[in-house]
Image (cartoon, grey):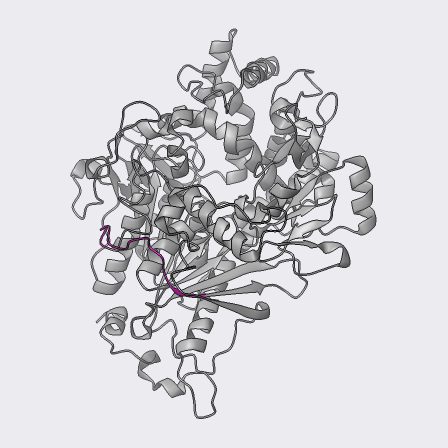
Amino acid sequence: MNRHLLCWLGLAAWAGGAPALAAPVNTPPAVLRGPVQETVYDGVSDDLLTGGLGKTGLLGAAPAFVDPLHPTSAELRRNAIHTNYRALVDSTVAGGFTVFYGPNIDTEGRDTLGEGKIAGREYIAWADDGSGRQNVTLMVQVPDSFRPEAACIVTGTSSGSRGIYGAIGTSGDWGLKRGCAVAYADKGSGNGFHDLMTNLAAARDGTLLDVGSGSTEALFAADITEAERVAFNTATPNRVAYKHAHSQQNPEKDWGRHTLNAIRLAFYVLNERFGKVGHDGLRRATLNSKNTLVIASSVSNGGGAALAAAELDTEGLIDGVAVSEPNAQPRHVKQLSIRQGSTTIGTIGKPLADYFTFANVYQPCALLSAQAGLSLHPAFWPAAYTTSAQNRCAALAARGLVKGATLSEQADDALARLRAYGWQPESDYLQQSHYRFATNSIAVTYTNAAGRFSVLDRLCGFSFANTDASGSVIAQVPAVQAGLFATGNGVPPTSGVNVVYDDSVGGARLDFLASSPSTGSADFALDGALCQRALVTGRDVVTGRRLTGPMKAWSDRVRAGIEEVQLGAHTHGTPVLIVAGRNDALLPVNHAARAWFAKSQSGGAKAANVRYVEVTNAQHFDSFIALGLFLGYDTRYIPLHVYFNRAMDAMWAHLVSGTPLPPSQVVRTVPRGGVPGAAPALTAAHVPPILQQPAAGDLIGFSANTLTIPD
């Protein structure tokens, strides 16, 4: 009988059949530095899931701080939950919030939970090597509905570079409603910033502290001397360092380890509360991996961390993995191929830094193609940006990097190059919005992270700072900075902090308004983008020659860091269910979900219980659907979050009841249509279920090292 089913029948109250008192003494994970902080939430004035806001508060604007310059840690937590919950889902009722998902929706999909507040206890701790430089935030939420006789843990590793509440609306929502403890980690990136001008940084609770005295209590402080900081500020004032980019630790290589540490912390705090007390008066580790169901989960970067954790899990901590749109970077895929319908995909399984630096070169020109289209509202895309995109096309053509005598031909060629490099044609519409909101930011962050560069290096001429309407650098706005823990996403541009091209003609400018020295025209800092691309490939982008001198040394560092984060796609027989959107332009499925799945299937029998579900008319940013009038997503895309919840349900049923996982398949959804900003409400007809017996034409297969995806 399934050991987790035994637990749910109340028949496995001790590990492996041994009496509870024979369990070892409960001890905290060795990686912890300092005490574990415990806070009790009553589920009325404040709670685990909604920060006391309930569904009504989550639907509205974030509450104001009583003193904007000095928000309290409780206010910052509340607003961080508001920001992060809404950042991962379409937060409109018409788009499904509070109807298909949300704090008021129960585990059966019914609107029965009222405001959805969940009482319980929240535990927060540092994972660190003692230096105060790592300071990975770990958190465990234990709802009052948790039952030791049916113990379960769900991981909620943050997506993107978000802070500790980054997965509250995804894994957190699902796990807390099931009565499971939720084990969160900020992955050692988190929303850690350091204002080099004022020397202020965020503490673990979000309040600001001065790191000048060498404090080890900041989420992040740049590893520089006081003399270096003063000199840097003199030369380049008002800059900000960010943990993911500038920690010099390449944090992604440890994302799986941090997820496992969050699980270990969960076992510790659960046993401190529920473990049996031995004759010596000490708590025992009664709850363990033998009698507790553990699902590793999350979305995007958090989903990639869950897969990495399963790969590293030699203790048998994880029973199953269910993730959505994971940042999965498999290594050694040259022997594999992917075919969609009758078309073999030409380029697959590239590392994230590779395909993002490629996009950062070509996307600004490709978005001018009639096949992609300028779809953004002028509030997000002023006329000056179109001029810069035209200049980018011209500069690429002058270098022989795109073909065509006219702007239209050049843009079409740039888009064709993106498709040839792994992007789906279904992603064409997304090229403009993704360049506007993500591509340049990620190219800057991940090249810095992979090469372990310092903020002092200003790699390829880029830095982070606030800017004014003209794009010039200005000081941080105190009232915005004071709340940055709650509003920031961990990767500029965020909460007023932007990407700046320091080498722009005429002086440092916002990258979107910057002019390259080689062209003398506003072209979205093409020189910087070519530099980043060269660091990833090891070759000059224009000539194809191998790099030499300092550029080669930097490139060697970046390429080594990229190798550190790649995965083998071996999960030791652990069942895995992945859902991803076919239209994903941020983490294209041919490089991420499809490629990782194909690599897993090449591993033989141990991959038999790994499944991949691809959802049509779904992309990466569900939250963008809510901006219908400005982006037009609401008429075209369904919320992938619906399928994240269904994947979690399917993994739960598999582990608890023995229900087979659904076969790998394409789920064909129906867009809502209508007019941007006024798309009709989402219905069940728009989001059909994942089927146990899909039509033959929807089955995804793998044979002879080829993954086959139906059109």
Asked if residue 523 is positioned above or below residue 329 in the image, the reply reads above
Q: Is residue 50 left or right of residue 645?
A: right
The spot of residue 308 in percent (x, y) is 46, 54
Q: Residue at x 24, y 73 (%)?
A: 6
Decide which of 267, 424 is in the foreground and name it: 267
The residue lying furthest to the bottom in this view is 279
Task: Tell me where residue 565 appears, x and y as whole percent.
Answer: 53, 49
Locate the C terminus by quadrant. Answer: top left
445 inside magenta stretch: no
Q: Residue at x 66, y 31 (%)?
A: 467
* Residue closest to the eye, 95 or 192: 95
Return the x and y of residue 398 as percentages of the image width and height: 61, 13
Q: Which residues are magenta?
A: 108-121
Q: Is residue 546 visible?
A: no
Q: Is residue 112 magenta?
A: yes
- The quarter holding residue 383 reads top right
Residue at image location 53% in from the left, 53% down from the top: 75
Measured from the top left, where is residue 547 in percent x and y? 68, 32
**Residue 589 found in image quarter:** top left
Which quarter of the rendering shows the N terminus? bottom left
Judge whether 67 appears above or below 675 on screen: below
688 versus 51 height, above or below = above
